Image (tube, rainbow, N blue to C red):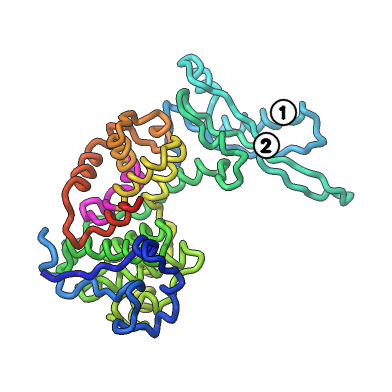
Amino acid sequence: MTSVNVLKGPGHKAKEGVKNDKLVNNISKRSAENSPEDIPKKRSVFGDITNALVGGHKKVFGQEVKKVGIRFSKKQKKTQQSEQVQDSLEEQNADNTYSEDTIRSSQEQGEDTTLYITAVEEQCVESEDKKPECEITAYVSQIVPSGVFDFDQECLEDPFSEAVYAKNIFSYYRERELMFPVEKYLRKQPEISKSMRAILVDWMVEVQESFELNHETLYLAVKLVDHYLMNNPVPKASLQLVGATAIFIACKFDERIPPVVDEFLYICDDAYSRKELLQMEIRLLKNINFDLGIPLSYRFLRRYARCDKISMEVLTLARYILETALMDYDLVDVKDSLLAAAALFLALKMKNITEWSPTLEYYSCYKSSDLEKLVLHLNKLISTPLHKNLQTVRTKYSHK
C-alpha cells in the first residue's frame, strides 16, 4: 500500500510560530532538499494509487411575495406617499404575487399579514433647476408566516447584510442549482475509483489550509472537478492536475490575492509543467462554459445558520459534516441546498437540539421529513472511521 505524505496546514504552522509569508517566498526556487520543514512539502498525491484504498420563490403556507421598489420625494405630502404605496401594491396584486383574497384567507387562519414599508436607500438627484433633491427608495418586505423569525427585517440597518436583496439572492441560487446538475460519472472513468477521488479531495483540503484560502474556494474547486470528470475521461496520472487547476481557477474567482502558478506546480511535486496547467485551465473553463457562479452548499449552510441564529459551536460542527461529505462520491448528485440543510439538521441533533424550527423550514424550503434519509447517510459517514490517508478534514476541525 502506497503511503501519501501529509501536507502541513496552518494549524501546524501556528503551533511552530511560522510566519505565513514563508509559504510564498521565492517558491519557484525551492526544492525538496533545501526546503524548511515548516514550508509545505511537495506532494504527489498519486504515486501508485491502484491499491491505495479498499473500497423562483417557493411558496410557504400558500404565500409568496416579491419585494417592490417604491420611490417618493421628501417634498411630497404623506397622502401622496400613501397613494404611491397603494398603487404599487395594486400592481403587485395584478401580477398575482399576493392578492387581497390571499391576505383575507391568511387573516382567517390567524397568520401574520403585516406589510413592512422600510426606507433603506437615499440618493440625491438634480432637478431641472439644478437644485439637489433627495429621494428615498422604500421596499415592501416579504411577508413571513407566523412563528418565523424575520432575520432580514432585523438586519436592514446593517450595510454588510444586504438584507433587502438576501431573500431574492438565495431564491436565485436555488434556481441556478438546476443549471449545474452532477451525475454519477465513474462508469465513464475506467482509471478512477471512489477512493482515488476521495484522496484527491483530501489533498485539496490540505492545499486550502496551506494557502489559507476561503472555504468557498474549496467547495467551488470540488464542483469544478466533478463537472469536468462528468464529461471528460481523465487518466490516473492527470487527476491531480485537474484538482490543482480547479483550485487555481477557484482562487481567481474567490480570493483577493490568489496564489501564482508556480506555487501550484510546487505543491504538485513538479509533476506537471506550466504549459500543462494552463492548458488544463482552458479545458476546465470551457467545460463549465466559463460560468463559475455555481451555488455552493457552504453558502446555503451559512445562510440557514444566520437566519435561525445558530451558535458558532453548532455551525462549526455542521461545517465539519459538510466538508467530510465532499469526499463521498455517493453524494455528488445531491443538491447543495439540500445537503447543507441535512448537515445542519444532523449537527442540531448531535447537540441535542431536536427541533427543525419553522424558521429553518422557511428559509431552507425543506421540512424535516425531506432530510431524514440524507441525515442518516451523513451520520453513517462521520461515524465510520476513515482511512489514515483521509484524515485532513478531521485534523482541520480538531483545533481548539
Residue at 47%, 26% in the rendered image: 145
Is the residue 236 above or below the residue 130 in the image? below
Numbered disc 2: secondary structure: strand
Residue located beneath label 1 in the image: 83
Disc 2, disc 1: CB below 8 Å? no
Residue located beneath label 2 in the image: 119
| Residue lying farthest to the right in this orientation | 129
Relative horizontal placement of residue 134, taking residue 251 as reference (left or right)? right
Q: Quadrant of residue 57?
A: top left
Instruction: Measure the C-alpha gap from mark 2 to mark 1.
Output: 16 Å
Q: Nearer the viewer, residue 388 or 97?
A: 388
Magenta-colored stretch includes residue 301: no
Q: What is the magenta segment's predominant secondary structure?
A: helix
Magenta span of residues: 324-341
Residue at 46%, 28% in the rendered image: 148
| The N terminus: image quadrant | bottom left
Residue 297 at least partly seen? yes
